[in-house]
Image (cartoon, rainbow, N blue to C red):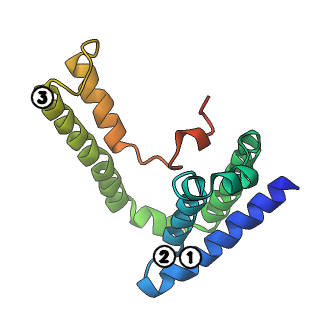
């Protein structure tokens, strides 16, 4: 029963937020991401922690996460089935360039940030070497992680 209430709350918030961003000429997915932030620990958990804990108790998050992953899988399957191969292949070169830029540019910026912070000497602990600092910072700058909280991540311990 709790899962059904959670799914209805999430779906309603997503629908409302998707409609709210339409006048701003934003795609519905932008509103859906905003709804996730509003319902998550970043806003609802901070403003109404008891309500957030009642709606999303910690022990219910693994099932909710798996329900979300199942929904995402079905959605991606539907998108894959609807994709016309000739259109996809005609866009392959520009998609590859965009994908490479989306990986290389943030990674390079993260490495540059690590070099700067390493030069300051007060950001990293003494046990972390320079190469490890650069790689760790670069990976983190490149990683577009959602959800906004590690506690809601399916891999969180």
Secondary element at image label 2: loop
Name the N-terminal-most of marks 1 and 3: 1
Q: Find the distance from the CA under tag 2 to the CA under tag 1.
A: 7 Å
Q: Find the distance from the CA under tag 1 to the CA under tag 3.
A: 43 Å
Instruction: Tell me: residue 137, above or below residue 100.
Output: above
Image location of residue 156, percent across then percent down: 59, 33
- Residue lying at 69% horizontally and 52% vertically, measured from the top left: 50
* Front disc: 1 or 3: 3
**Which residue corresponds to mark 2?**
27
Q: Is residue 116 left or right of residue 52?
A: left
Name the N-terminal-most of marks 2 and 1: 1
Which residue appears farthest toward the left when viewing the image?
A: 119
The reply to whether residue 73 is visible in this rendering is no
The reply to whether residue 39 is visible in this rendering is yes
Secondary element at image label 3: helix
Whether the residues at callouts 1 and 3 have beta carbons within 8 Å, the answer is no
Quadrant in the picture for residue 84: bottom right
Image location of residue 104, percent across then percent down: 26, 44
- Given residues 150 and 41, the one toward you in this image is 41
- Residue lying at 50% horizontally and 49% vertically, measured from the top left: 148
**Which residue corresponds to mark 1?**
18
**Which residue corresponds to mark 3?**
120
Image location of residue 14, percent across then percent down: 62, 70
Instruction: Tell me: residue 23, above or below residue 42.
Output: below
């Amino acid at each position: 029963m709790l899962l059904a209430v959670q799914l209805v709350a999430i779906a309603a918030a997503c629908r409302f937020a998707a409609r709210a961003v339409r006048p701003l000429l934003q795609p519905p997915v932008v509103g859906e991401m905003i709804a996730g932030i509003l319902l998550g620990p970043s806003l609802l958990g901070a403003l109404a922690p008891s309500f957030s804990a009642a709606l999303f108790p910690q022990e219910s998050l693994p099932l909710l996460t798996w329900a979300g992953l199942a929904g995402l899988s079905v959605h991606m399957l539907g998108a894959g089935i609807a994709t016309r191969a000739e259109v996809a292949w005609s866009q392959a070169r520009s998609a590859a360039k965009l994908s490479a830029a989306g990986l290389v540019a943030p990674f390079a910026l993260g490495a540059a940030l690590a070099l700067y912070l390493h030069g300051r000497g007060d950001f990293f602990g003494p046990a972390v070497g320079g190469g490890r600092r650069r790689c760790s910072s670069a990976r983190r700058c490149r990683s577009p992680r959602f959800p906004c909280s590690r506690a809601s991540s399916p891999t969180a311990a």
